[in-house]
Image (cartoon, grey):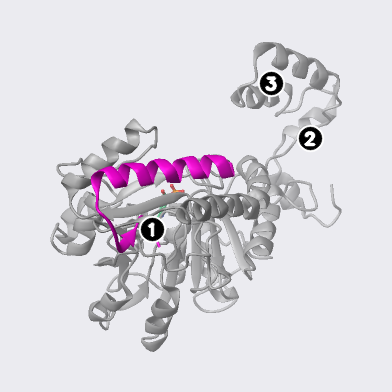
Amino acid sequence: MPKHRTDQEVALQGSMRAVTRIKTKGKPKIGVDEFMALCGRFGFAKPTLNKIRKIVLEADWGEGPFFANYYSGLKESSVQAFERVAREVFGARHSIGTSSGSGALHAACVAAGVGPGTEVICPAIGFFATANAVDLAGGKPVFCDVDESLHMDPAKIESLINERTAAIAPTHVMGGVCDMDRIMKIANRHSLRVIEDCAQSCGAQYKGRYVGTIGDLGIFSISCYKITGAGEGGLLLARDRRLWERASQVVECGGLWRPSRFAPPRYPGELFTGTNYRMSELEATLDVVQLKKLPQTVQRFRTVKRHILDRLRPFREITPQICNEPEGEVGYLLRFFPETIELGERIVEGLRAQKIDASMRGKNAPPDWHCYAYMYPLAVKYGFKRGDCPVADDLFDRVINVPLNQWYSAVDCRTVAGRINAVLSACCTPGPNGRACN
Ligand SMILES: Cc1ncc(COP(=O)(O)O)c(C=O)c1O
């Protein structure tokens, strides 16, 4: 144990280690059984588990691991390593590992000064968590309609700005990227904070910069549903130290982030109430590995999408999704708009018959928290309803989604593109007006 630790810190490490040192060797609090439970969760078969158990039973477990961020006994805990790797991968100055993307969003909102009497401009298509975090911080979400990129339409932002507006919170949707130049220009003109929600586009870039590092704050979900993530986790990136300190205060209730954690405020406004959104050491251990793989993962998705796009033919009744940054998006989804929902239904049916996993919401689909009008806790509270953002209403129901697999070979890509062309040829008119994406 390093010598510089205070008595209080030693006490905080828990009595377990001390107890195991007194009479007998005892067993570590976290040992073979816990390790085997983890191996079981990985899904190994019984014979493999038996072999692993035999090996690890022979190992000297000492006091066992201590899964704490601050007092791990390591030079760098897994959470600290995750935060460092995040800074290195994204080229960010400040980072915080969190328990979820939702927690990171709440912390980002508070850091950005969102509170009672303020408003934040959120996209009509994204996910409930963004607007929810605004409300949780005491502010009011205001929804901005989208354009044919399915991202916040920069042309519609300024009419929503008033003296209460504190921030713009663009969401990079499903591997795509927002038109960040135009959004940043508007934010700078009106001195507004920008909170980028990158939960669905971890690893995407805009003009050579990773999303999440362009605005004042960037948040990510590092959960099992995202392209990077092992269970439940999140990440917050901050442009400057003051924003990082404010976000840390929310994540680390009680100022645990400070060098002298229990000391009174060092400057007015430093300390305020927060909660515990800390990332767990176990989660961080897996996420460090995941995050290091991110650039290769993104590259594979991009190559697959490019291969397919290059082979798609134009059809008059198909409008491609606008890509704000074709070179920068992650590209795990191919999206395009058929002229009508009826046509879309025929196309989806044809694609599925060809074993292409396509979907479209269509008419009378169940509510979905990725579109503003269905975010009921907020829609009811603030009176949002279908019709407020007509472009989102229309496109959300009509967009055809074709998920792509990063492991497709060049032959697979040719096959997928060929089948999409065949189905579109059967349902549409070949023509110069568009193709299934730009
Ligand atoms: C755009 C967006 N923001 C935030 C979140 C919330 O992330 P988490 O599930 O890690 O809380 C999600 C989750 O799907 C999301 O899609």
* Label 1 sits on residue: 437
* Label 3 sits on residue: 33
**Rendering coords of residue 413 (x, y %):** 51, 44
Q: In terms of depth relative to the viewer, which is nearer, 436 or 85?
A: 436
- Helix, strand, or loop for circle 3? helix
* Label 2 sits on residue: 18
- Vertical placement of 148 versus 295: above or below? below
Asked whether, in this view, residue 213 is left or right of residue 392, the answer is: right
Q: In terms of depth relative to the viewer, which is nearer, 231 or 303?
A: 303
**Rendering coords of residue 307 (x, y %):** 52, 52
Q: Main secondary structure of the magenta part?
A: helix
Residue occupying the point 76% across, 19% down: 52
Characterize the local packing of mark 3: few (<14), some (14-19) or many (20 or more) Cα atoms within 10 angstroms: few
Picture quadrant where residue 385 is located: bottom left
The amino acid type, in three-letter code, at marker 1 is Cys
Q: Quadrant of the C terminus?
A: bottom left
**Rendering coords of residue 430 (x, y %):** 29, 55
Residue range corresponding to the magenta coloring: 409-438
Residue occupying the point 36% across, 65% down: 322
The amino acid type, in three-letter code, at marker 3 is Asp
Q: In terms of depth relative to the viewer, which is nearer, 100 or 13?
A: 100
